[in-house]
Image (cartoon, rainbow, N blue to C red):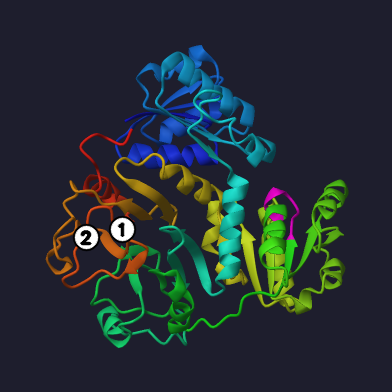
Amino acid sequence: MKVIICGAGRVGYGIAERLSEEGNDVSVIDTSAALIAAITETLDVSGVVGHGAHPDVLAKAGADQAEMIIAVTLHDEINMVACQVAHSLFKVPTKIARIRAQSYLAPEYSDLFSRDDMPIDVAISPEIEVGKMVLRRISYPGATDVVRFADDRIVMLAIECMEDCPVVNTPLKQLTELFPDLNATVTGIYRNGKLFVARSADEMQTGDLAYVVCETTHVRRTLSLFGHEEQEAARIVIAGGGNIGLFVARTIEEYQPKTRIKIIESDRDRAVRIADQLRNTVVLHGSALDQKLLLEADIQDADLVVALTNNDQINILGSVMAKKLGCKQNLVLLNEPSFQDFVKSLGIDAHINPRAVTISGILQHVRKGRIRSVYAVQRGAAEVIEAEALETSPLVGTPFRDLVLPEGLRIGAIYRDGAVLRPGGNMRIRARDRVVLFATGEAVHHVQQLFRVSIQYF
């Protein structure tokens, strides 16, 4: 598939890396010659230095042959115009744009991005996607990662096995026998820097990170089984009142009115603006590294501090200080991937990489076949995928006990007619079932083959 990516920054690089590894023909456009040089030297992609919305630049990148354009520059207007030009002049079938300004995404202007007006097929808002991820983490304390699938009926949890974890040294097959009514399946395990698909004979070890697919109503029991009994936060301090912090606070106010929220914002004008937009949230002006201000925010009584500033160092140090002052848990936004390797040793309980969230949101629209949702874990080492099985799928009709899956795949759950089913035994996948599975990076192309249709998705 020929794909054009406008923007060679972190997100553009990440998407180009994934698509080129899978054998796609990728061209990257950026105004920075240095970024284009870096991406073409390290990845199997072609590069064009220029403005992503200019027709001659798009033509040089091969827009007349492209099946998709993904515009992820830092400027919304460039992304939108690039999609418009790709549509009007080059008839590019699929157009994806990163849109950050919330005004463009307001419900009353929902007709803006349509084939008759501005032909953008998918508008990705990084702030909203990250905000939703923060809210999911808040809802399920004890999990280091949370993603929902199948109309929110299925959840993927990343759960750390602590020293007192009850399931340590127990074969996964035995867990299924001990808890037959628990609709949960361990699909992947991250151990000592390596990620692999879980098999029935595997045993969990202390320090493992388990990727568990379970029914949403069974999340609490699943976390409890792994020794996590943390209660949902009733008192939250948010460091950073940007778009993400405002979205999180506003959503909590609406759906969890009993939760007490305080925001620390370093920009005085911004602090005043968000205070006017929030009903019950206390907004404090100052630095998240100011110990006196943290105490003024009653950090010692807080259940959770969520660090959402645009500065990784402030997020890390502020969260560490908050825990030292008595806050029970912390959740940190980290833009720099290399920081993820050592934050745990500093006392960071959980972190979110906005780049990974944005890339996952875009990938689900890039995959071929009946792929409905995609979430990348461990920097793309694996993906959790929701796909719809059609009559043509080789999975349909074969009992699970006789099903031979490609190496690197494990099915976690089936969603059928509003019910969540745990795979196994004589159960058979039916046409129109939605399957949630775990696939290593090397096995992703097998998933697309298993769920593809006779006419390709695009």
Q: Is residue 76 toward the left or the right of residue 301 in the image?
A: left
Q: Is residue 385 toward the left or the right of residue 15 in the image?
A: left
> What residue range appears in magenta?
239-245
Residue type indicated by callout 1? Val
* SS state under label 2: loop
Within the magenta stretch, is there residue 243? yes
Label 1, label 2: how many angstroms apart (C-alpha)? 8 Å
Q: Residue at x 67, y 40 (%)?
A: 102
Query: Upstream in the sequence, badge 1 or badge 2?
Result: 2
Above or below: residue 455 compared with residue 173: above
- Mark number displayed over residue 429: 2
Please, which residue is most extreme toward the top here? 56
Instruction: Please name whichever residue, 152 or 177, is drawn nearer the observer in this view of the structure.
Output: 152
Q: Quadrant of residue 344?
A: bottom right
Within the magenta stretch, is there residue 364? no
The percent coordinates of residue 134 (x first, y second) are: 60, 60
**Quick one: quadrant of the N terminus?**
top left
Q: Are marks 1 and 2 in contact (CB under 8 Å)?
A: yes
Instruction: Please name whichever residue, 161 or 437, is drawn nearer the observer in this view of the structure.
Output: 437
Instruction: Please name whichever residue, 114 or 120, is drawn nearer the observer in this view of the structure.
Output: 114
**Quick one: quadrant of the C terminus?**
top left
Above or below: residue 22 compared with residue 247: above
The residue carrying pointer 1 sits among few (fewer than 14), some (14 to 19) or many (20 or more) residues within 10 Å by Cα, namely many
What residue is shown with label 1?
Answer: 435
